Amino acid sequence: MREVLFVAISQSGKSPDLLAATQNARAGGARTIALCNTPDSPLMQAVDVPIPLHAGPEKSVAATKSYIASLSCLVQLVANWAQDFGLSAELARLPGQLARAWKCDWSAGVEALTPAHNLYVVARGFGLGIAQEAALKLKETCGLHAEAFSSAEIKHGPMALVREGFPVLMLTQDDETRAGIEALAAEFAARGATVLLSGARARGATTLPTVTAHPVLEPILAIQSFYAMANNLSLARGLDPDRPPHLHKVTETV
């Protein structure tokens, strides 16, 4: 693994599988970096370059602020590596934008998803990662069977389930992927699906308000707005979003 950059990302820095992979990479000659929210964790001690996220203690089992801090740190890494000074300048505006994103009213999503049992979360490009994160949080905190798909991948079979009343949360950003998401949202709405659309508008879909920013940063802002909705949705479904059943703060897999 000489001349390989190995980046490990963790909230706790204690998961045995992540530690083993990082230690093996370093032993193989990789340059290792850790983005971690626990400065004194074993992971931070196992790498060449430890980078603390400074998100503060995660008080709930389902990590949120450390996830956003990880994304912003990755954007900073890419912007500096690529010498994209425009993106670096936009990143400096992110804290204020996050504060506004938290106040976006996604109560329509709470109303639509409170009685739900299953749903899809759909995105593409930069937004696909947050679609996966949203689906995970809906499972953890809301007890919903949520699956994340790329707007291209969903056409290979899964879209057959999207029919009358089926809920779909769709996330997009202002780049070349938006038009395809809007077209798919309109198609799903025409079938009678309950479509919640962030970052765009489409006939028959319920628009969830978002904060406009650089396309690389808009997914980070969308997940911030989503977290507020997920918290309220969990409470509306009679659950405790901070203490999901059967989960622990440190995930131990071998």
Image (cartoon, helix red, strand yellow):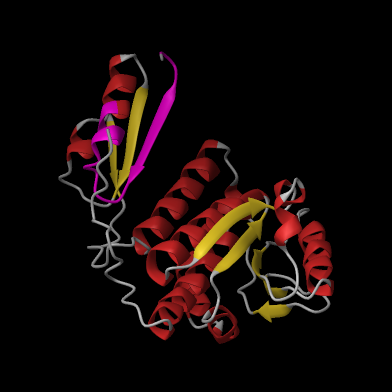
What quarter of the picture does the C terminus occupy? Answer: top left
Find residue 196 and report its image quarter: bottom right
- The vertical placement of 224 against 88, above or below, is below
Of residues 137 and 157, the one nearer the viewer is 157
- In this rendering, does residue 185 appear at all? yes
Q: Using the rendered image of the protein, determine whether residue 86 is visible from the camera's viewpoint.
A: no
> Residue 68: x percent and y percent?
43, 59
Residue at (67, 71) in percent of width and height:
166
Q: Which residues are magenta?
A: 2-20
Which residue is pictured at 31% across the width and 66% down the height?
244
Near-viewer residue (25 or 50): 25
Q: Quadrant of residue 9?
A: top left
For the N terminus, the quadrant is top left
**Residue 6 magenta-highlighted:** yes
The residue located at (48%, 57%) in the rendering is 133
Q: Position of residue 222 (x, y in %)?
A: 56, 67
Height in image: 32 above or below 209? above
On the rendered structure, is 143 left or right of 59? right
Name the residue furthest left: 40
Question: Foreground: 201 or 50?
Answer: 201
